[in-house]
């Protein structure tokens, strides 16, 4: 049984049935460290890989206790309702059982690259950082003909996508993006996703499409703008193009700061504080700064040499063999 940070129910069922279980996280959350804070509670105004003074090491560890208990308070009731149908199961306690998980030595896979966020010294061998877990590439995907024509008729565009982010004012978001592209004198491709932009009207120099394989469309970009989700950040960095992160909430601010710390892109203001002029400045910085461009290309090449799925699979097989 492979369970995610919001899938504690899977671990409970596995224990009840005597099945081996493995944790799988795409951001720092399940296991505490003093090296950097929980992805859901980054230190205000600080880079994430800088434990520094003792008070920050203590703070970093406490962020895991707080964020784990916060999530636990949301999922405990529905998990208990589900477990009520499992023979012999006991109700989950009010306090998060992640303290026990942290002390158990169980295998938990971390699906990001150690080149992006290194293995902290206080994590054991049971907490490997495997590299990103990527889907098969989009080589078999057939792009719409008008998208191919758009890409071929001008300079490489800025590709923009916010994945599963929803609840935004589509018109305001559309005006922000178009305004920024115009100020930066760049063409754009917008992946509308769940943002509500699918019905928005864009000028001729901005192409919109509901979705496209990240590896394919990012490879056509001059730079990539996204929300900073763990998977999208990995895909953007793998492309080798400068990454511009405009975080909305949750772990997105954590990854935005990490991108900036790696000098592979630009971390902008959060969405709530963003303006067209500020986003245009981020575009110009990401596309004109040679240091960012070279660093992005080098990091992208290194990330493409990794195979996180293969590494994670080997750990699972090794665990089963040693059982």
Image (cartoon, rainbow, N blue to C red):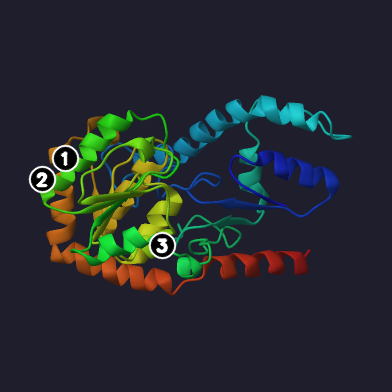
How far across and how far down the image is residue 85, in percent?
A: 84, 31
Identify the image quadrant of the C terminus.
Answer: bottom right
Quadrant housing residue 213: bottom left
Depth order, front residue of 195/9: 195
In the image, is residue 237 above or below residue 61? Answer: below
Position of residue 284 in the picture relative to residue 295 (left or right) = left
Relative to 123, 163 lies left or right: left
Residue 124 position by quadrant: bottom right
Q: What kind of element bears circle 1?
A: helix
Q: In x, y percent, where is residue 193?
A: 42, 43
The alpha-carbon separation of the residues under discs 2 and 1 comes to: 6 Å
Residue under pointer 1: 179
- Residue nearest the observer in this picture, 95 or 289: 289
Helix, strand or loop at mark 3: loop
Instruction: Identify the residue position indicated by label 3 in the image.
Output: 143
Q: Residues within 10 Å of mark 2 (few under 14, many from 20)?
A: some
For marks 3 and 2, the one nearer the N-term is 3
Spot occupied by residue 272 in the image (x, y as percentages of width and height): 27, 30
Residue under the image location 17 percent in, 48 percent down = 282
SS of the residue under disc 2: helix
Q: Are marks 3 and 1 in contact (CB under 8 Å)?
A: no
Q: Residues within 10 Å of mark 3 (few under 14, many from 20)?
A: few
Whether residue 50 is visible, yes or no, is: no
* Above or below 154: residue 189: above
Residue 50: x %, y % from top left? 32, 51
**Marks 3/1: CA–CA distance:** 27 Å
Report the residue at 68% width, 24% height from top: 77
Left or right: 3, with 272 as reference point:
right
Q: Nearer the observer, disc 3 or disc 2?
A: 3
Label 1 Cα crowd, 10 Å radius (few <14 / some 14-19 / many 20+): some
- Please give the label number shown on residue 183: 2
């Amino acid at each position: 049984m492979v369970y995610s940070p919001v899938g504690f129910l899977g671990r409970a069922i596995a224990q009840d049935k005597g099945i081996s279980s493995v944790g799988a996280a795409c951001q720092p959350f399940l296991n505490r460290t003093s090296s950097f804070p929980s992805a859901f509670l980054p230190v205000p105004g600080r880079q994430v890989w800088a434990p520094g003074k003792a008070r920050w090491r203590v703070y970093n560890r406490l962020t895991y206790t707080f964020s784990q208990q916060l999530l636990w308070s949301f999922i405990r009731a529905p998990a208990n309702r589900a477990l009520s149908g499992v023979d012999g199961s006991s109700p989950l306690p009010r306090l998060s059982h992640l303290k026990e998980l942290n002390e158990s030595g169980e295998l938990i896979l971390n699906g990001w690259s150690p080149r992006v966020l290194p293995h902290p010294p206080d994590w054991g061998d049971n907490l490997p950082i495997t590299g990103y877990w990527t889907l098969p590439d989009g080589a078999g995907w057939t792009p719409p003909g008008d998208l191919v024509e758009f890409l071929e008729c001008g300079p490489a565009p800025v590709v923009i996508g916010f994945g599963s982010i929803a609840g935004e004012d589509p018109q305001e978001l559309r005006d922000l993006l178009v305004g920024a592209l115009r100020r930066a004198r760049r063409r754009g491709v917008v992946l509308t996703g769940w943002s509500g932009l699918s019905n928005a009207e864009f000028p001729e120099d901005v192409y919109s499409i509901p979705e496209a394989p990240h590896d394919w469309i990012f490879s056509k970009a001059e730079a990539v703008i996204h929300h900073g989700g763990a998977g999208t950040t990995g895909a953007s960095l793998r492309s080798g193009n400068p990454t511009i992160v405009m975080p909305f909430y949750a772990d997105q601010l954590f990854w935005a700061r990490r991108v900036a710390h790696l000098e592979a892109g630009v971390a902008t203001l959060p969405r709530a504080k963003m303006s067209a002029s500020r986003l245009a400045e981020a575009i110009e910085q990401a596309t004109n700064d040679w240091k960012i461009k070279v660093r992005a290309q080098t990091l992208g090449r290194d990330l493409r040499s990794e195979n996180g799925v293969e590494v994670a699979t080997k750990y699972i097989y090794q665990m089963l063999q040693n059982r």
